[in-house]
Amino acid sequence: MGVSLSGVMKESREAGRGARARRGRPALPTLMLVLTVVTGLVEAVSLLALGPVFTAMQTGNVLFLSFGVARAGDLPALPSAVSLAAFVVGVVCGALMEAAAEARGRRWFVIGLGVEAVLILVAAGIGWGLERHYGAPTERQLAVAAVLALAMGIRTLTIMRSNVPGVPTTLVTRSMTAFLSGSTLGQGSSLEYGSPSWVRRGLAVPAMFLGGMGGALLLVGAGWTVNWLLLPASGLVLAVGLTAYLEHPRLHTGQSSRREPCEPSDASDPSDLSDLSDPSDPSR
């Protein structure tokens, strides 16, 4: 069967344009790192201005709640209980909305980030003018913490269902463990020292650190109020969602292998997680 030289050249040009387009757009793990910075910023607001409470990393709230129930120290139990309850509602509502959206062919990753951005904006409005605070929270501070925890519950569900290994965006413990065990110190053969996935896990830690440090410096050092920290946080989340909408048109949640986030092994090429294709796409 003869092969047309012009046809081969055309296919080659199209493949080259596709490769350049993929290289030019932000990779999905890069967007996840931006969300990790936002988490650090939000937690700085939660811990330094809303009382001793977490809104994303619920392990801390479980411990704070246990200390408060035991009446150990000056940790009140109410803020942690409110945050935990709101986070649970966020996860459950997020799961229901994600299933409904994906069943209709909608892209929940984009919708979920849009919902999160709106909730953070609402929290900024409720907390307008609130300054750094430590101790028993007021009703306004509890309301802000609840809305932020609701947003972080939806975020955690969204990222978990997106199946991007190495960057869970709301915690760094497993990322740090995988990074160190896969390094020359840990010599973990399954974690591919120097691979893109290994690098992502390492970058997740400073991303969280920078977000937290930036929030603390602005809140405590510069005297910013809660709203001026949450407004840019909402903007960053919205920017990530819009970028995903424009640059990753085939991105759908829950379609890859059912893996937990931060799973050490990557079934796909870790250097190309810029898109997660729709399984119904005939080109797969």
Image: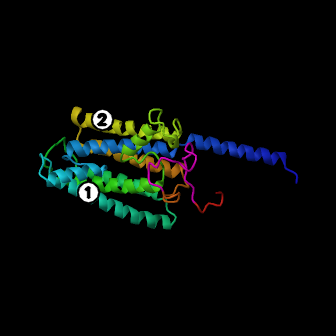
**Residue 177 shown in magenta:** no
How packed is label 2: few (under 14 Cα within 10 Å), some, or many (20 or more)? Answer: some
Q: Is residue 216 left or right of residue 72?
A: right
Where in the figure is residue 56, as x and y percent of width and height?
Answer: 31, 50
Task: Inspect the image, locate mark 1, and give the three-letter code of the amino acid beneath it.
Answer: Leu
Whether pointer 2 and pointer 1 mark residues with C-beta atoms closer than 8 Å, the reply is no
Q: Residue at x 56, y 55 (%)?
A: 250
Helix, strand or loop at disc 1? helix
Q: Nearer the viewer, residue 105 or 238?
A: 105
What is the quadrant of the C terminus in the image?
A: bottom right
Residue 209 image point, x, y percent: 34, 37
Q: Earlier in the sequence, mark 2 or mark 1?
A: 1
Main structural element of the magenta stretch: helix, strand or loop?
loop
- Asked if residue 223 can be seen in this view, the reply is no
| Residue holding disc 1 | 84
- Kindly identify the residue that appears in the image at 19 percent across and 45 percent down: 130
Q: Which type of secondary structure does the marked residue at label 2 adopt?
A: helix
Residue 277 image point, x, y percent: 57, 55
Callout in the foreground (2, 1): 1
Residues drawn in magenta: 259-278
| Residue 253 versus residue 230 in the image, above or below | below
Q: Is residue 69 visible in the rendered structure shown here? A: yes
Disc 2 marks a residue whose amino acid type is Met
Q: Which quadrant, please, contains the N terminus? A: bottom right
| Residue where numbered disc 2 is placed | 213
